[in-house]
Amino acid sequence: MNIIDWYIIRKYLSSFVVMIALFIPIGIMVDMAEKIDKFKENEVPGQAILNYYLDFTWYFGNLLFPIFLFLAVIWFTSKLANNTEIIALLSSGISFTRFLRPYLISAGFIALFAFFAGMFIVPKSNIGYNTFVYKYIAKKNERQTKNLYKQINPREYIFVSSYDPIRKSGNNFTLEHFEDNTMTFKIQANSIRWVDKDSVFRLSGYVKRSLSGDLEVYHRKSRLDTLFDFKIDNLAPVNYKAETLTFFPLNEFIKKEREGGSVMINSHLLVRHKRWSLPFSAFILTLIGVSVSSFKRRGGMGVNLAFGIAMGFLFIFFDKIFSVMVNKSNFSPFLGAWLPITIFGGLAIFLMQRAKR
């Protein structure tokens, strides 16, 4: 690589950092203005708010990653174009494809960072972010799992009519145990609660019905402390569970959910596919950004930046549309994650061919 390559790489990466440093504080201020009444109403501790916004930084950055990338490329490249530096480079015999090389190398650095963050950092931040929202922001009825029924192992099924992850307690608990497709016993309780101090499940209104041929035996207790072959987290709201798991635990979680016949398996698979597809978007969005901003146009940098914001939001819009299709229908999680990349990849090739002319 020559001096020009290093210059473009340095400017690209520094512009990307500037966009993050510029927009994340704005996002924090907007979010704080929206939630300040909830903070006061629920008397949220200052340390909890501080931890929330540390987690929010990663959540917000991951959400608007395409816009930050687009703006960084367009802002920096438009400045080169306005100073006629790009025309000078291309006039010296450098092809447009060769001109793209330092951009793609920079995109590679950002893609590696996005991959590592998406696999290991963002999921940990999502734990704190979602826990805070469920504890202090969400309405009471939004905090609970409703009518959860799932298989926890090849022989046992559990059910709760509602579960509160903050209190770690559920109502109308049922466990059914089968041997050779025949139910051998059934446990019911008015409530189930995890007791951290003793590391046990506490059942209230406990009833165990044992079956052996035509014989039925009932065992009742007003309260029973016991252990089961599942964790209390199995009752947690699964709509965001996958988002809080790092690479290896996510694979294990998906395996168990698939074995248990989870109705949300497609949503979990979508989360995994997106962690692989998001880094690739760095290359696609870079090609689009360079192709539309590498030449002077009427309106200057302002038009290019407006286009960058519009394209960034359009990418996010497509991403959300396909995500909804996966979550609300039988649409393929693989296609839901990769179709936006494919569509914008086609657009990138078209714009790049036009820019070469």
Image (cartoon, rainbow, N blue to C red):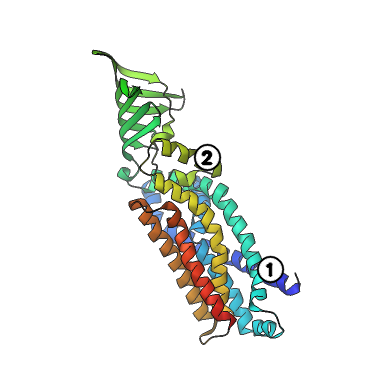
Image coordinates for residue 219, horizontal then vertical, percent: 29, 14
C-alpha span from label 1 to label 2: 36 Å
Identity of the residue drawn at 40% across and 50% down:
39
The first of marks 1 and 2 along the sequence is 1
Q: Quadrant of the N terminus?
A: bottom right
Seen in the picture, residue 26 relative to 351 is either above or below; the reply is above
Q: Is residue 293 visible?
A: yes
* Residue toward you, 12 or 47: 12
In the rendered image, which residue does mark 1 sit on? 10
Which residue reaches farthest front? 180
* Residue toward you, 310 or 176: 176
How packed mark 2 is, by other alpha carbons closer than 10 Å (few <14, some 14-19, many 20 or more), is few
Q: Quadrant of the C terminus?
A: bottom right
Q: Amino acid at mark 1?
A: Arg
Label 1 vs label 2, nearer the camera = 2
Q: Residue 131 appears in which quarter of the rendering?
A: top left
How packed mark 1 is, by other alpha carbons closer than 10 Å (few <14, some 14-19, many 20 or more), is some
Q: Amino acid at mark 2?
A: Pro
- In the rendering, which numbered label is found on residue 249? 2
Which residue reaches farthest right? 2
- Element marked by disc 1: helix
Identity of the residue drawn at 32% across and 37% down:
148
* Residue toward you, 83 or 102: 102
Q: Is residue 43 left or right of residue 222?
A: right
